[in-house]
Image: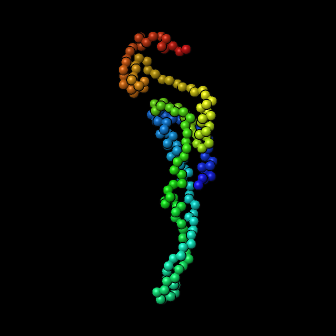
């Protein structure tokens, strides 16, 4: 059963990823929040069914039993019985950033996931700002990696520093 809200949930949107957060965790958080919003909708009134209940005849003192037609709700479609209406949602990410990197990620939902492929194939310009510390080298090239080499600024040749 597709709801009208899910059918309208299509497109691309941008999200800032701070440093220290993995892109997959951000994607999972977005998916979880969208699912919470979809499932927060008030469920429809339960369907009524006619049941025949065995009971004593009203106004009779004898112990005779009769069938009485009664309308009762069917609970098979109740959210507490069947669970949430939406359990997964396709959320795509246009590109990935390392956990230490920060920047804007483009996400797609629904038909927007197909647009992510078109964006990737368009080879759009990306802008990177790199920050570094001269004179230190680590085993994994990250600032929190194990230090493997250290030098003074005088030992760094000019061509390594100049911008071209």
User: Which residue is at a point 52% across and 61% down the rendered structure image?
Assistant: 78
Find residue 164 and report its horizontal and vertical position in percent: 55, 14
- At which x and y percent is residue 26? 49, 39
Report the residue at 50% width, 79% height from top: 54
Asked if residue 99 shows in the view, the reply is yes
**Residue sitting at x 54%, y 51%:** 86
View extreme (bottom): residue: 61
For the N terminus, the quadrant is: bottom right
Q: How is the image coloured?
A: rainbow
- In the rendered image of this protein, does residue 47 appear above or below residue 9? below
- Hey, which quadrant is residue 153 in on the image? top left
Question: For residue 114, which quarter of the picture?
Answer: top right
- Vertical position of residue 11 compared to residue 61: above or below: above
Say if residue 15 shows up in the picture. no
Q: Is residue 76 above or below residue 118?
A: below
User: What residue is shown at x 60% (from left), y 44% (from top)?
Assistant: 110
User: In the figure, 1 relative to 16: above or below?
Assistant: below
The mark total stands at 0
């Amino acid at each position: 059963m597709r709801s009208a809200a899910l059918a309208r949930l299509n497109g691309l949107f941008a999200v800032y990823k701070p440093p220290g957060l993995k892109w997959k965790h951000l994607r999972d958080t977005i998916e979880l929040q969208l699912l919470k919003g979809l499932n927060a909708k008030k469920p429809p009134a339960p369907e009524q069914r006619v049941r025949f209940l065995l009971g004593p005849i009203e106004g009779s003192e004898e112990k005779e039993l009769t069938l009485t037609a009664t309308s009762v709700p069917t609970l098979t479609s109740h959210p507490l019985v069947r669970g949430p209406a939406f359990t997964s949602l396709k959320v795509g990410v246009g590109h990935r950033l390392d956990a230490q990197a920060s920047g804007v990620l483009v996400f797609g939902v629904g038909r927007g996931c197909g647009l992510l492929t078109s964006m990737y194939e368009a080879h759009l310009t990306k802008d990177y700002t790199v920050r570094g510390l001269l004179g230190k080298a680590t085993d994994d090239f990250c600032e929190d990696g194990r230090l493997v080499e250290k030098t003074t600024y005088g030992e760094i040749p000019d061509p390594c520093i100049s911008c071209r």
